[in-house]
Amino acid sequence: MIVLRSLLLLMAVGLLVQGCAFSRGTLGDDIGSEAVAAIKKGTTTKAEMLALLGAPDRLLQVNGRDVFQYYRYDAKVGSLLLIIINFSRFSIKSDDLFVILNREGIVEDIILSKRTDGLEFRFWPFGE
């Protein structure tokens, strides 16, 4: 009888010790839609663009042109914490802005991708 009670107590403690955890992290600053809308192809200069957006996260040189990259990553993690085994599911998306400047320092093209708005916590680690 003592063995049965001990086993039931151990099972009850095991059920109460397990749990869930949710975490969230971001890297980079939010890319403001108003600032991006203020940048005009063919007229905005490098100095004006830097005043609107600040220093880029990454600077590339492609065929004599400067490419300024601004990014923001958003990550969400849902975890199921069990006694013997733990499961986690990471969801990561990014917002990216590329501004291409010609050799004279005038904005030639703007490429914007905003994907972090619909990022959800996904708890179950298998499938969708």
Image (cartoon, grey):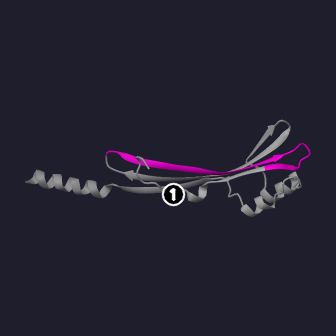
Q: Position of residue 88 (x, y in %)?
A: 43, 48
Q: Amino acid at mark 1?
A: Glu
| SS assignment at label 1 | loop
The x, y position of residue 124, in whole percent, is: 40, 52
Find the magenta span and give its range. 84-109
Residue under the point 82% across and 57% down? 39
Q: Relative to 117, is 101 on the left or the right?
A: right
Task: Specify whether residue 2 is painted magenta.
Answer: no
Our reading of the magenta stretch's main secondary structure is: strand
Residue 128 to residue 34: above or below: above
Q: Position of residue 41 (x, y in %)?
A: 84, 53
Q: Mark 1 sits on what residue?
A: 120
Looking at the image, which residue is at 13% across and 55% down?
5
On the rendered structure, is 28 left or right of 44?
A: left
The answer to which of 16 and 53 lies nearer the viewer is: 53
Please determine whether, in this image, residue 90 is positioned above or below residue 16: above
The picture places residue 40, in percent across and down from the top left corner, at 84, 57
> Badge 1, how many Cα within 10 Å: few under 14, some, many 20+?
few
Considering every residue shown, the one lying at the far top of the view is 63
**Left or right of 42, for residue 114:** left
Q: Is residue 99 magenta?
A: yes
Residue with the most extreme right position = 104
Q: Residue at 81% of width from left, 38% of height from top?
A: 61
**Tag count in the figure?**
1
Question: In the image, is 29 to the left or to the right of 1?
Answer: right
Q: Nearer the viewer, residue 82 or 123?
A: 123
Please name the residue shown 79% across and 55% down the image: 54
User: Which quarter of the image is occupied by the N terminus?
Assistant: bottom left
In the displayed image of the protein, which residue is found farthest to the bottom? 34
